[in-house]
């Protein structure tokens, strides 16, 4: 049995952001995420994509913060500067290109060609 929408029930409560993560990190990434939404086209497109899916503003902002966190982690892990994909379209709107599958005849031909190399 469900409570009517006017009464308190966990089913009808507004969803909120989890407080389980590192509060210091979340606080440190809040302003950079706001700046990134305004000045980095791929993050702006990602934010607008989430807002178009009727996500609350804060949820979309937290998603941008998570993307920044992953970028920063990768930057430290690989000892390279953080490079934003500014010249390409948004990763949300494009799909990775797959190589066309080789047929069995093509595989056999390539295998024979490798064997006959000097």
Image (spheres, rainbow, N blue to C red):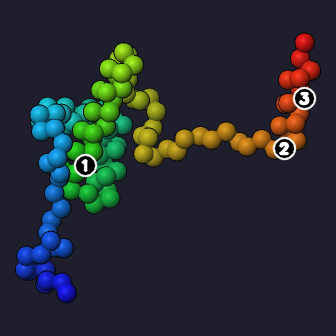
Task: Identify the image quadrant of the N terminus.
Answer: bottom left
Residue 79 visible, this orientation: yes
Of the two numbered discs 2 and 3 on the same chain, state the one appearing first in sequence.
Answer: 2
Which label was assigned to residue 60? Answer: 1
Q: Which of marks 1 and 2 is in front?
A: 2
Farthest residue in the front direction?
Answer: 20
Residue plotted at (22% across, 45% down): 62
* Residue at disc 1, secondary structure: helix
Apparent side of residue 104 relative to residue 24 in the rendered image (left or right): right
Q: How crowded is mark 1: few (under 14 residues within 10 Å), some or many (20 or more)?
A: some
Task: Residue 100 in the image: state x and y as whole percent.
Answer: 71, 42
In the image, is residue 1 above or below residue 61?
A: below
Which label was assigned to residue 27? Answer: none
Identify the residue position indicated by label 3 in the image. 112
Front one among 31 and 70: 70
Of the two numbered discs 1 and 2 on the same chain, state the one appearing first in sequence.
Answer: 1
Query: Decide: marks 1, 2 in contact (CB < 8 A)?
Result: no
Identify the residue position indicated by label 2 in the image. 104
Residue 31 visible, this orientation: no
* Residue at disc 3, secondary structure: helix
Farthest residue in the bottom direction?
Answer: 1
């Amino acid at each position: 049995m469900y409570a009517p929408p006017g009464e308190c029930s966990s089913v009808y409560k507004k969803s909120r952001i989890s407080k389980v993560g590192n509060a210091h990190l979340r606080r440190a990434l809040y302003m950079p995420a706001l700046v990134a939404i305004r000045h980095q086209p791929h993050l702006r497109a990602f934010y607008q994509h989430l807002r178009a899916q009727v996500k609350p503003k804060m949820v979309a902002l937290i998603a941008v913060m998570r993307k920044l966190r992953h970028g920063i982690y990768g930057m430290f892990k690989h000892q390279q500067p953080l490079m934003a994909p500014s010249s390409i379209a948004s990763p949300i709107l494009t799909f990775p290109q797959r190589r066309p599958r080789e047929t069995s005849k093509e595989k056999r031909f390539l295998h024979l060609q490798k064997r006959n190399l000097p």
